[in-house]
Amino acid sequence: MVYALVVLILTTVLYGGAMAQSGCSDALTSLFPCLGYLTGGSSSPTSNCCDQFLTVVHSSPECLCMVVNSKENSFSGFSFNRTLALNLPTVCNVQTPSPSHCKESNIEEGENQNKLEVAPALISVHPSQKSVAVTVGSDLRVFDLIEKCPVTLVDESDVPSRKESIRAIRYSASGKLFVSAGDDKLVKIWSAESWRCLITVCSEKRVSAVAISSDDLHACYADKFGVVWVVELDGINEGEVVASKKGASLLSHYCSIITSLEYSPDGRYILSADRDFKIRVTVFPKKPLEGAHEIQSFCLGHTEFITCIAFISTPELTQGYLMSGSGDSTVRLWDITSGSLLDTCEVSTMAGHLVSNETEPPTQVTVTDICGIPNSSFAAVAIQSFQGILLLSCDLSAHTLSITKVIKIPGESFIPTSISVSTSTKLLWMVSGASNLPGSNHPGFSRVRVMSCTDTESFPILEDEQIPGGTKLLEQLQGKVAIEESVMSAAAEAVRAAMSSLLMKKQYSEEKREFRKRTRNDKKTT
């Protein structure tokens, strides 16, 4: 009975019930010789107390962080002296982790879970330009370009969307389906005609990338733990609303944030790009629910995180080649069959001067999005912090990439966060914006611009009234026609900081690395 009381005091009184649930019960129970000192019953801790305390410091330092972070001093009538508890390392002459470790552990594993992260605005246009979709934060906005009216989404699924940021959207190659996914751990497949939600897939983790097979039979999505999942789109062509389901693991043990997913034009391969500088080309199996086990190649050469991948092809070369953009200031051209690097285009030489107004040497810049212009050898490239678009020319026979033109967007701080193009028209759709801006009451904003790719000499930026859908489209996709320039500038900086925080690997000392390993959630007992 006495021992049980000691356990109760140590695990719920001293450190709080929530702490006991975090895997510290055994460690705290071993400190019962310290109870007299911590509750003020004795003037100094016993030698047995200090020995046990030293053991806990070496085996479970995360439990000490819980004491530092806890604000509780009493429970059910029992009280302890918090000052004495924090002074125990000194009186026992025991070296403990730096308080900064505890602060960082608290911030990274606690506060960030409740803090809304900045999410860039995204855009996707129907392959035949029948509609265009923009997402900012949790808002999915669609405009019908045929009827020239806003679209009302109908979600009758048993798992409705939550108010968390959407991180990936796209149309299927056929234009029949549309997929959205993000931080709410839901992947929603919509009919791109009726705009009803047909299938809701529940993910175990937040989703970072999506793709739909060219035959509309499978959808793939990747989570931030590096797993690629696949789901069969049963009954999707009949327009039936299917009950929510879970995906099957297609590619596991990736151990890196996957930033982009693409099917090859012929549907033979599924490609994934990640934070660890690599592109994996995997044969898409005949029975994908049983997993994909045949790796065709790895495309290796980038020296920083990869942000985007896209295919460029011509009518003569339908399979085309793969382009990739990265935080290392390059766009690279690949042969996915062999994984060979064909060419590298340094965009920092051009964009770096433009971003710094040509007053400083070129600095490393991040490629945020790539889009191949259909039936041409051109590709549009969006650069972080650059107010415009770079146009690259790809000589597919010579396997070379080169910067053809720099398109600056005049008049406002428009820095594209996402770009898209239809296969039927040569209009490049661009969006700039973000949600959850720090220090702002504004939930988020988006600004849409369109560039014509018909005139390959000038590539003019269309005025608002020239955009298909005009002001009605802008009101739907932007929320309003006019956007303050100061808000756009703030959003561009917020997106830059958020991307760096997410994709740039943090560097830790050996001591801090070992501490973080010991405090990982999957190392804690339940």
Image (tube, rainbow, N blue to C red):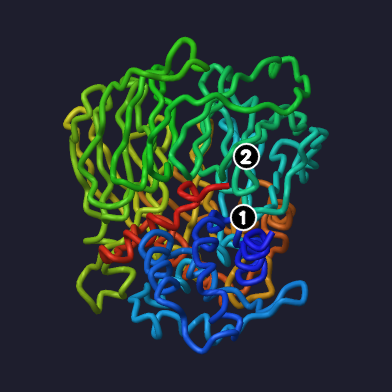
Give the image quarter of residue 308.
Answer: top left
x, y (%) of residue 482?
Answer: 67, 68
Q: Is residue 454 above or below residue 127?
A: below
Q: Amino acid at mark 1?
A: Gln
Secondary structure under the numbered disc 1 in the rendered image: helix
Can you tell which mark lies on residue 170?
none
In the orientation shown, which residue stands out farthest toward the bottom? 43
Q: What residue is drawn where x is 58% and y is 20%?
A: 216
Residue 189 in the figure: left or right of residue 102: right
Point out the frontmost of discs 1 and 2: 1
Asked if residue 160 shows in the view, the reply is yes
Q: Earlier in the sequence, mark 1 or mark 2?
A: 1
x, y (%) of residue 523?
Answer: 45, 48
Residue 140 in the figure: left or right of residue 433: right
Q: CA distance from mark 1 to mark 2?
A: 35 Å
Q: Is residue 44 above or below residue 200?
A: below
Q: What residue is drawn where x is 63% and y is 33%?
A: 178
Residue 391 in the figure: left or right of residue 492: left
For mark 2, what is the residue? 180
Q: Nearer the viewer, residue 232 or 195?
A: 232
Q: What residue is drawn where x is 26% and y is 69%?
A: 353
Q: Amino acid at mark 2?
A: Ser
Give the image quarter of residue 93.
Answer: bottom left
Q: Is residue 479 above or below residue 225?
A: below
Number of residues whose C-alpha sits closer than 10 Å to that of mark 2, classed few (under 14), some (14–19) or many (20 or more): many
- Looking at the rendering, in which quadrant would you find the N terminus? bottom right
Residue 5 in the figure: left or right of residue 458: right
Secondary structure under the numbered disc 2 in the rendered image: strand
Q: Nearer the viewer, residue 259 or 515?
A: 515
Can you tell which mark lies on residue 21?
1
